[in-house]
């Protein structure tokens, strides 16, 4: 559903993934959340970082599905947004474990 919404609104990875990767989540998480995320990124495999980007989109989908303008999406991925870190990390681990070998970002 979210990917379909992105497609309808011409939202590419340049908007929904690159800002998270480029800023290493520093724009969207509070300092405490960022430290928590980086504890996990540094502890687990490199793919955890990429899976966290996917998980962030999944966890925030209820907000993202309400947007209809490219500018709204862009602003969202460059601003702090409330997020349940326990849920974000849980979903990240699920994405990491359930992604098929063909699509897994592991090295």
Image: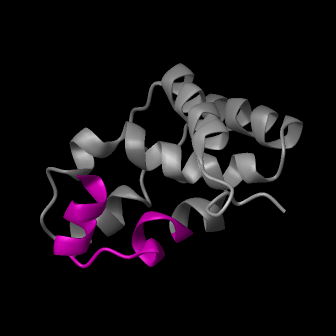
Q: In the rendered image of this protein, does residue 21 appear above or below residue 91?
A: below
- Residue projecting furthest to the top: 86
Based on the picture, tell me whether residue 31 belongs to the magenta stretch: no
**Is residue 81 shown to the viewer in this render?**
no
The image position of residue 78, as x and y in percent, is 44, 60
Q: Quadrant of residue 85?
A: top right
In the rendered image, residue 34, in percent from the top left (x then y), is placed at: 66, 38
Q: Give the residues in magenta.
A: 1-18
Q: Nearer the viewer, residue 61 or 97?
A: 97
Nearer to us in this view, 23 or 106: 106
Observer-nearest residue: 93 or 23?
93
Q: What's the colour scheme?
A: one colour
Q: Is residue 6 magenta?
A: yes
Q: Check the image and report above or below for 37 versus 57.
A: above
Q: Main secondary structure of the magenta part?
A: helix
Q: Is residue 79 above or below residue 14?
A: above
Classify the position of the C terminus by image quarter: bottom right
Which residue is depicted at the point 20% across and 62% down?
Answer: 5
Which residue lies at the image location 50% right of the left edge and 65% below the top edge? Answer: 17
Occupied quadrant, residue 102: bottom right
Residue 58 x %, y %: 40, 43
For the view shown, which residue lies furthest in the front direction? 101
Judge whether residue 13 can be spotted in this image. Answer: yes
Q: Residue at 27% across / 54% down in the picture?
A: 2
Q: Position of residue 61 (x, y in %)?
A: 30, 44
């Amino acid at each position: 559903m979210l990917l379909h919404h992105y497609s309808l609104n011409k939202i590419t990875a340049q908007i929904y993934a690159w800002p998270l990767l480029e800023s290493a989540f520093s724009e969207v998480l509070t300092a405490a959340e960022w430290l928590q995320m980086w504890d996990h990124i540094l502890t687990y495999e490199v793919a955890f970082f990429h899976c966290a980007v996917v998980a962030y989109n999944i966890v925030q989908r209820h907000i993202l599905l309400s947007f209809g303008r490219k500018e709204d999406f862009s602003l969202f991925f460059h601003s702090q947004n409330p997020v349940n870190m326990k849920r974000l990390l849980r979903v990240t681990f699920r994405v990491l474990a359930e992604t098929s070998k063909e699509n897994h970002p592991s090295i």
